[in-house]
Image (cartoon, coloured by chain):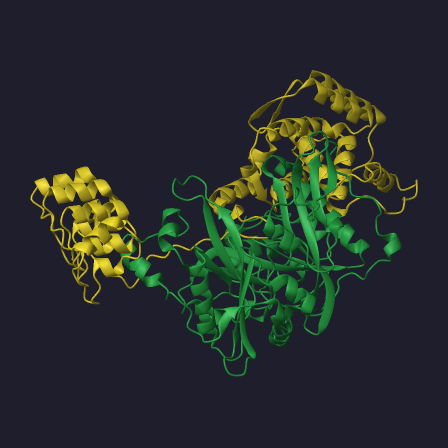
Amino acid sequence: MGDWQELGQAVFIGLTFAFLVAKLISIVVSFRGDQLRITREDDLQGEADASRNGDSGVLEEDAGVSEEEKLLGEESDDDWEGIESTELDEEFSAATTFVAATAADRMAPKVSNDVQLQLYGLYKIATEGPCNAPQPSAMKVTARAKWNAWQKLGVMSPEEAMQKYIMIVTELYPNWADNSNTRNKDEDTAASVSSSSDKARMGPVFSSFVYEEELDNDLTLEAIHVSAREGKTQELLSYIENGVSVNLRDSEGRTPLHWAVDRGHFDSVETLIGKNADINAKDEEGQTPLHYAVVCGREAIAEFLVKHNADINIRDKDDNSPRSLCSSPWPFMHSTKVLQ
Amino acid sequence: MDSGSNTEAPNPNHDPSSPSESDAAPPPSETGIEAIARRVQESLSLSASARHRFWETQPVGQFRDLGDSSLPEGPIEAPTPLSEVRRDPYNLPAPYEWTTCDMDDDHTCTEEFLRWALRPPGHFKSWHIGVRVKVSKKLVAFITGVPARIRVRNEVIRMAEINFLCVHKKLRSKRLAPVMIKEVTRRVHLENIWQAAYTAGVVIPTPIATCRYWHRSLNPKKLIDVGFSRLGARMTMSRTIKLYKLPDSTVTPGFRKMELRDVPAVTRLLRDYLSQFTVAPEFDENDVEHWLLPVENVVDSYLVESPESHEITDFCSFYTLPSSILNNQNYSMLKAAYSYYNVSTKTPLLQLMNDALIVAKQNEYDVFNALDVMQNESFLKELKFGPGDGHLHYYLYNYRIRTELQPSHLGLVLL
């Protein structure tokens, strides 16, 4: 970064400033990224004020604020997030890398000293904060010019400096980001870790289970069990029509009906019962589909099974019946109890 | 680091120019510091080149100092005279202004949890900082701090615990976070406090410890239905529910809810227990009364009172954070318990925590979360906690610890 050359003519300042003012007047539609943004009239006023302060870099900035503010009014509280974003830092880093590479490349088109100094000042603000270094002697022309560029930015915030820096680089080299390896890599990575960015916050972190396929489970399922588990009623029907037994067991003795009940697929349960599935089929542990319905709290399915004569008193190998396992006050379990 | 995870802890002694860098060769202009930062980021699967220019300007442990044993432990910068602390708030973008959130006002703060979290003994209202839109007065960002005494090795230091940095999504491009951090820091300095502790889900310069969340299903069916946990293709719901089933009542004789009269005994128990950890809060009776005396649906504490001697021998606690569930027709809230401080002297920790799970289940919590801090690792697997995908990194501001701590050396839980 340090390789800036001598101070250019004052005319460049005039030209740059004139350009920015011209841009200010003409901006009604401004682009940021791929997004089209309509700028309102009062924003232009804000920009004009800003530019009178010699603070020409804030044009797009202020427009953005108002736009966001307007959107805010329409948004619900669901849009709150914790943050610790580094997108700006990353983009700024990429921009400085690009500028350094461009400055080192003799073939690259040169930018004016004035713009270079402007970038220098912004860089110093972004990385070191406001200038409080002593003023270099007037004899040291380059050092003095650089100091002036830094010092005149005053107490600008590092974030603002980064944004302005990026804006200037983007104006000079609209396609800089495409040519920057760093940036492309960042984007690839960002896409692949998007889930971690949800956790980018200070304070409470939302965590949920890491998904781990159970390793010690050597259960084998047939296709009809998978269909029952997924609630794919049409597939179930076609297996049965093609001669697969409606009571086919998986390696732990479960029928398709067990699986359909376990996952709560009412339609599939209905279909299997309609195809004369064994309603009191026992798995290896002696549990029937009604045991499953009770344990899993599937009231509608349990009621349906009871109506189709599932045995509520059938014992599994631990001597538990569906009725004894049922902690919910389901009337269809109670009324039958009375009959016993 | 957490043994249950595949991610590698950043090794402070790792040579930054090691060959493993070659795959992700940095641009030529990148310095060694950035290369290390990059490695730290990559090792935790975060954005590969997230560089933290803001944090590089702050008195925090820097990535480049990792493994530098010549640096002293303790404050990084000496306190400046109070008269030199900036008097005026930092500047915000023009449409916004600073505001102080009044947590005493029921209209402003209906959230019971925040009233508990933000009003401990000696709290400063000026540390409850909001940013609002000047015109509409709508709150768009906030950050908070509360005072605490935290011991690091043998030094007890007055610190701010910084928490709840939130910025409205629409303002994330405004980079409000750094200015909010600077503003809260300024206000902390004005109280003559120069250190802070905070946690984050991301890596910034530089964690003093990295912990992992573990989760214990209490209501597995609901957790599966809302997508908090997944049901394996070869696992049945029926078996999963049986796996996580808990007894209807607690098993330890004398296990009961903490009451006001227990504050002195609990304080003694806790102070004694926490003294073994490298970093831990220094609680007095006022702190215990505030942080641990049960508040319904905010914080719960249970203890074991010996039926014979009536001595308080063991203690466990958890706080409550409900989360909203979006897009589910059956459930709108997830009620989560977070393990807080637990002390076992007579009752085995495993049994104590199993009783904590039982009371949480009785009180209709859906999940019980715990970090692998303190001695928690000793019961997590046995009590059927599963590893979570969330890491929690602990940080100290303006206080250097030379080497990263094991989670089991941390005696601190920040909300």
Q: Which of the chains is green? A: B
Is residue B37 rendered to the left or right of residue B189?
left
Dividing the image into 4 quarters, which one contains the N terminus of chain A? top right
Which residue appears farthest toward the bottom when viewing the image? B309
x, y percentage for residue B65? 67, 62
Dividing the image into 4 quarters, which one contains the C terminus of chain A? bottom left
Asked if B371 appears above or below A32 in the picture, the reply is: below
- Judge whether residue B72 can be spotted in this image: no
Which residue appears farthest toward the top when viewing the image? A26
Given residues A222 and A259, the one toward you in this image is A259
Given residues A294 and B260, the one toward you in this image is B260
Given residues B179 and B20, the one toward you in this image is B179
Is residue A303 rendered to the left or right of residue A87?
left
Quadrant of the rendered structure where residue B361 is? bottom left
Which residue appears farthest toward the right when viewing the image? A138
Task: Name the residue located 62 percent from the left edge and 51 percent from the top edge.
Answer: B114
x, y percentage for residue A112? 75, 30
Asked if B237 appears above or below B101 in the picture, the reply is: below
Task: Name the residue located 40 percent from the left edge and 70 percent from the top edge.
Answer: B382
Given residues A183 and B337, the one toward you in this image is B337
